[in-house]
Amino acid sequence: SSGAPSYYRVLVLGASGVGKSALINQFMSSENNTSEDPSGLDGIVSVMLDDEESLIELCNFPDEQYPAEDINVDAYVVVFSITDQTTYKYAAHLLKYLRNDLCSDRSIFVVANKTDLVRKRTVERNEARLTASYYNCKYVETSASLNHHVDNLLVGILSQIRLKLNPD
Ligand code: GDP
């Protein structure tokens, strides 16, 4: 492939306890992480897609804080727990803030995490999906604990970032 890999920054946002660290840890140990020393680069994964390597820095944003600007950000991941309405409402506030106040047109992924806790579910899939599409975001359900759909999410984030940079 051609030259140095592209470098992208992804902010991971959401209420405390929704699984942001767990997701990032799964990204780091993903089979898609072709980094030669995965433990050496904290929060940075190397992903091969369409024969092209990209480095993706995953920044765990401080809980309950809003980013002040979206300079140097290529995508956002807004996480909530399907077992906790409060974290869903907080995620919806974050989406509103990013789109309406920050006027961000970056790719945003809404991640409904903890899908393994089926019987504790209190956030309906259709409602969350509707909120995501209202704010023009991708919607993904994951279980960081079971590593379910986490790899798809990582590749999806990279695809969306590339699509925005090269629309044709
Ligand atoms: P953070 O505060 O958003 O970074 O959340 P953490 O990653 O520290 O996770 C908070 C708690 O939720 C920990 O006890 C995790 O083990 C647990 N957790 C994270 N993801 C999942 C998941 O997908 N399913 C379940 N059952 N627990 C999870």
Image: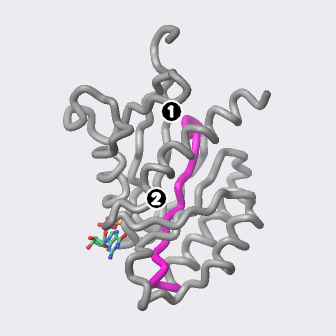
In this rendered view, identify the residue nearer to me: 137 or 150.
150
Between discs 2 and 1, the one toward the N terminus: 1
Looking at the image, residue 59 sits to the left or right of residue 50; the answer is left
Residue at x 51% of width, y 42% of height: 155
The residue tagged 2 is: 149
Looking at the image, residue 46 sits to the left or right of residue 40; the answer is right
The residue tagged 1 is: 8
Q: In which quarter of the image is the C terminus?
A: top right
Residue at x 46% of width, y 19% of height: 5
Q: Is residue 74 within the magenta segment? A: yes
Q: Is residue 14 within the magenta segment? A: no
In this rendered view, identify the residue nearer to me: 17 or 115.
115
Q: Give the range drawn in magenta.
A: 71-85
Where does the image place residue 115, in percent across and percent down from the top left? 44, 75
Other-residue count near label 1 (Cα within 10 Å), few / some / many at <14 / 14–19 / ≥20: some
Where does the image place residue 143, in percent across and percent down from the top left? 40, 67
Q: What element carries label 2?
A: loop
Q: How far apart are marks 2 and 1 (CA)?
A: 21 Å
In this rendered view, identify the residue nearer to me: 50 or 166.
50
Q: Residue furthest top?
A: 3
Residue at x 63% of width, y 72% of height: 92
**Colouring:** one colour
Dot 2 amino acid type: His
Residue at x 26% of width, y 33% of height: 41
Dot 1 amino acid type: Tyr
Q: Is mark 1 on a helix, strand or loop?
A: strand
